[in-house]
Amino acid sequence: MSDDYYVIHKKVLPDYFEKVIQIKELTNKDINISEACKQVGLSRSTYYKYKDYVNRPSNKVGKRMILSLKLLDEPGSLSNILNEIAKCKANVLAINQEVPIHNIAFVTITVAILNNDITVQELTGEIKKINNVIDVNLLAVE
């Protein structure tokens, strides 16, 4: 059920959630759970308590996400973002743009990532580098 999940930035979560993910990634590299817990500095009981509930977003084909962008209202700003999305082999599914206020434009873009080689974090990072982009926030990912 979709009401059972939230998208939360890791900055606001306790560090043991990130450590659970690190342990999962280590055990995928043939390191046993006890050794991975020691390397990461997390008790086995804490790992087992959260292991079924903490996951990194999938890097598989077909990821869809909704991004909220804050841009300077300058010619070409949105076009540069759309070009970057296309360069990353992602598909724009929808765009909603508010009327700019005080030279700031607010845009919501729904994107489908078609490329196995790029993650949600990498795509948002590339968009943040574009001139006239003030802020990029991930609103949802599926």
Image (cartoon, helix red, strand yellow):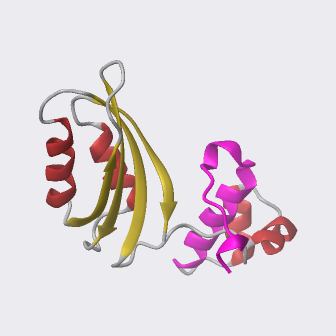
In this orientation, which residue lies closer to the viewer: 4 or 48? 4
Q: In terms of image quadrants, where is residue 72?
A: top left
Query: Looking at the image, is 68 positioned above or below residue 53?
Result: above
Where residue 119 appears, as percent x and y from the top left, is: 37, 62
Where residue 63 appears, as percent x and y from the top left, is: 39, 72
Q: Is residue 79 within the magenta segment?
A: no
Q: In terms of image quadrants, where is residue 5?
A: bottom right
Query: Looking at the image, which residue is at 73% across and 62% down?
Result: 38
Where residue 45 appears, as percent x and y from the top left, is: 87, 70
Q: In the visual, does 12 lie left or right of 133? A: right
Q: Quadrant of the N terminus?
A: bottom right
In this orientation, which residue lies closer to the viewer: 126 or 135? 135
Query: Looking at the image, which residue is at 65% across and 56% down?
Result: 18
Q: In the visual, does 5 lie left or right of 82? A: right
Q: Is residue 27 within the magenta segment?
A: yes
Q: Give the prevailing secondary structure in the magenta stretch.
A: helix
Residue that protrudes farthest toward the right in the picture: 45
Query: Looking at the image, which residue is at 81% across and 75% down?
Result: 48
Residue that protrudes farthest toward the top in the picture: 102
Query: Looking at the image, is 54 positioned above or below residue 9?
Result: below
In this orientation, which residue lies closer to the viewer: 106 or 121? 106
Where residue 54 appears, as percent x and y from the top left, is: 68, 68
Query: Looking at the image, which residue is at 51% across and 68% down?
Result: 57
Residue span colored magenta: 1-29
Q: How many marks?
A: 0
Query: Looking at the image, is 113 positioned above or below residue 106?
Result: below
In this orientation, which residue lies closer to the viewer: 5 or 118? 5
Q: In terms of image quadrants, where is residue 46?
A: bottom right
